[in-house]
């Protein structure tokens, strides 16, 4: 190897190291340091204060509310997401591209705007307010609106994961199953669903993470009633505003931990899904 | 697309005539369910916002813009979104490159860590930034001695937005980079191109639309982001009050029409960008 070539290799290696260092520095600054800071702060506060915070009725209620909203959101966006994805891929009709564009709307709308829309529809002077008020149903500043806005925000996740897989698997297997006399439901549960299961699971994991962390929309529609319409994120928000920073940090760290667990599930699902896709 | 339509044609022949009416009805029922679901949960709220904001023509929008700080909030949001989109385009591409092309200890961990913003709630990122740069923290003190204030300044907004949008460009660019044939780059290098020229002339044209798609997505997300921003920005009118927080504060004052006008304005920009991103991704998939 000539001296010039050797010098070039050395230069390339230096360049490589510099780029890797830059990447690691950026990720550390934006992601790892903030995480480390909150872990450190909570660890310093000690286990007893963590236990004390997490057993407060307000905190327990907040986690419970987040759980309820997340479960309902996952169920509804999961079932209807598969239906919409199926219709988008398997049917040709006028308005299909319109339907496709509608699915993307929640990506473009600020969560605050979603909350505002719920207030305009169900709030004081809203379009549907007289209807529900006459029946004594509280929608706004109560659980129903909080669920509705969370569903709105999570609608695209399942659909956008399932659509490409449905497109890829095509109709051959389903047609074979139908020709052999299987019913539509049987074909769906035995052929289609197993094919889309990892995509669906990935979509559900993304939905879960988003539903747990939603703040902008529920901030507007919840009315921030302590111990009543307060989700885990809203608890953090209020606790911080009321200078109960220690409690805010602890609940924030718990939410982060739950979300990281969800992320690990997401990652393993994606690897599975990719492996499955390369096999087909 | 035409082949899919064809298979559907074949399929209805397969199903045969007696079941045909049932099959058609089932198709219509599912399509109806899809339209009702999206119509009630997406179209209706959007229609409500637009009607509320622009029901009286542009008068409400003019009034909303006349609220002190309104225009400043929109400007701040557009400027910070532009800065963050630009930073993300460069750093996202760099990170995707490092994750795909280089082999070094910790690469897989890095690949997982960059997905953290997808999982951890945006508000929690905000709280973590508060802890990290707070007056009692090491970094907060260090920055203070350098004369830099992070918290409750536009810098905190940029930092928060960079964090929550970090994966967007990476996740768009990564699959394209993985598919790229390294032989072309080697050919360019053999022909005497410098590494920068190789990147500019060989790699970048291939990943351009993916970088662009990720950047647009970042920008449109920044226009609406509130969770990570609301605690760290300080929300001072005309200084660190962003448009989404402004909409929130109008809403809590029950000024729904004005809030809806500002919201519609932001949504219009954002929706065009999201549609454009979808087109870019589709184009790439069809050409690839």
Image (cartoon, rainbow, N blue to C red):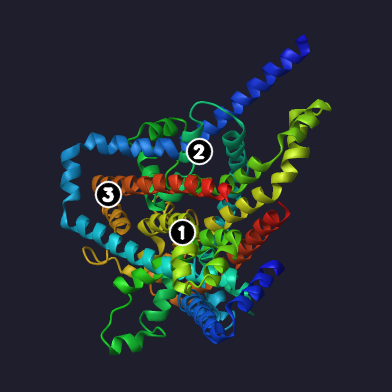
> Residue B174, position in %: x, y?
60, 43
Which subunit holds the residue at mark 3? A
Q: Name the residue under label 2.
A: B111
Which subunit holds the residue at mark 1? A
- Residue under the point 59% across and 81% down: B16
Q: Is residue B237 above or below residue A26?
A: below
Name the residue nearer the viewer: B246 or A37.
A37
Marks 1 and 2, how far apart in space? 28 Å
> Residue B33, position in %: x, y?
48, 79
Q: Mark 3 points at which residue?
A: A251
> Residue A96, position in %: x, y?
61, 75
> Residue B191, position in %: x, y?
84, 28
Residue at disc 1, secondary structure: helix
- Residue under the point 80% across and 31% down: B188
Residue at disc 2, secondary structure: helix
Q: Quadrant of residue B245?
A: bottom left
Q: Is residue A179 above or below residue A234?
A: below
Marks 3 and 1, how far apart in space? 37 Å
Q: How crowded is mark 2: few (under 14 residues within 10 Å), some or many (20 or more)?
A: some
- Residue under the point 73% across and 54% down: B287
Query: Is there one chain holding both mark 1 and mark 2?
Result: no
Q: Name the residue under label 1.
A: A194
Q: Pointer 1 and pointer 2: residues touching (CB < 8 Å)?
A: no
| Image quarter (top left, top right, bottom left or bottom right) of the N terminus of chain B | bottom right
């Amino acid at each position: 190897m000539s001296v010039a070539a050797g010098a070039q290799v050395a230069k390339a290696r230096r360049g490589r190291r510099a780029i890797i260092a830059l990447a690691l520095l950026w990720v550390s600054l934006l992601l790892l340091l903030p995480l480390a800071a909150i872990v450190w702060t909570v660890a310093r506060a000690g286990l007893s204060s963590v236990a004390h915070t997490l057993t407060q009725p307000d905190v327990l209620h907040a986690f419970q509310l987040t759980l309820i909203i997340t479960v309902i959101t996952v169920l509804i966006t999961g079932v209807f997401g598969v239906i919409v994805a199926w219709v988008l891929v398997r049917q040709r009709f006028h308005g299909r591209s319109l339907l496709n564009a509608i699915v993307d709307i929640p990506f473009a709308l600020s969560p605050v705007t979603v909350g505002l829309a719920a207030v305009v529809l169900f709030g004081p002077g809203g379009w549907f307010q007289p209807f529900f008020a006459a029946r004594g149903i509280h929608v706004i500043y109560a659980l129903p609106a909080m669920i509705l806005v969370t569903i709105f925000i999570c609608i695209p996740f399942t659909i956008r994961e399932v659509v490409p897989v449905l497109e890829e698997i095509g109709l051959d297997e389903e047609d074979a199953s139908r020709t052999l006399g299987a019913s539509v439901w049987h074909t769906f549960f035995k052929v289609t669903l197993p094919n889309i299961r990892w995509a669906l699971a990935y979509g559900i994991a993304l939905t879960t993470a988003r539903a747990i962390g939603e703040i902008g929309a529920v901030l507007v529609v919840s009315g921030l009633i302590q111990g009543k319409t307060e989700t885990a994120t809203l608890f953090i928000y209020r606790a911080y505003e009321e200078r109960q920073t220690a409690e805010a940090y602890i609940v924030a760290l718990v939410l982060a931990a739950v979300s990281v667990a969800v992320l690990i599930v997401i990652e393993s699902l994606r690897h599975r899904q990719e492996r499955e896709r390369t096999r087909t | 697309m035409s082949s899919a339509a064809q298979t559907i044609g074949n399929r209805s022949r397969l199903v045969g005539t007696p079941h045909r009416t049932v099959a058609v009805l089932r198709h219509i029922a599912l399509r109806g369910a899809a339209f009702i679901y999206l119509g009630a949960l997406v179209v209706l709220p959007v229609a409500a916002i637009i009607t509320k904001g622009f029901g009286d023509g542009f008068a409400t929008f003019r009034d909303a813009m006349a609220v002190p700080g309104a225009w400043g909030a929109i400007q701040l949001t557009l400027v910070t979104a532009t800065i963050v989109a630009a930073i993300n385009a460069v750093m996202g591409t760099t990170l995707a490159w490092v994750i795909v092309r280089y082999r070094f200890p910790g690469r897989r961990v890095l690949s997982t860590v960059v997905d953290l913003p997808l999982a951890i709630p945006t508000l929690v990122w905000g709280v973590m930034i508060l802890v990290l740069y707070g007056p009692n923290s090491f970094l907060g003190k260090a920055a203070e001695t350098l004369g830099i204030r992070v918290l409750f300044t536009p810098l905190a907004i940029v930092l928060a937005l960079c964090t929550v949008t970090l994966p967007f460009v990476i996740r768009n660019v990564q699959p394209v980079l993985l598919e790229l044939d390294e032989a072309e780059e080697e050919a360019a290098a053999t022909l005497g191109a410098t590494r920068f020229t190789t990147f500019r002339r060989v790699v970048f044209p291939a990943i351009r639309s993916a970088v662009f798609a990720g950047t647009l997505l970042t920008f449109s997300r920044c226009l609406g982001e509130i969770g990570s921003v609301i605690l760290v920005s300080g929300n001072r009118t005309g200084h660190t009050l962003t448009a989404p927080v402004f909409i929130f504060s109008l809403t809590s004052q029950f000024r729904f029409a004005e809030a809806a006008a500002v919201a519609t304005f932001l949504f219009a920009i954002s929706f065009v960008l999201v549609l454009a991103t979808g087109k870019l991704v589709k184009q790439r998939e069809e050409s690839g």
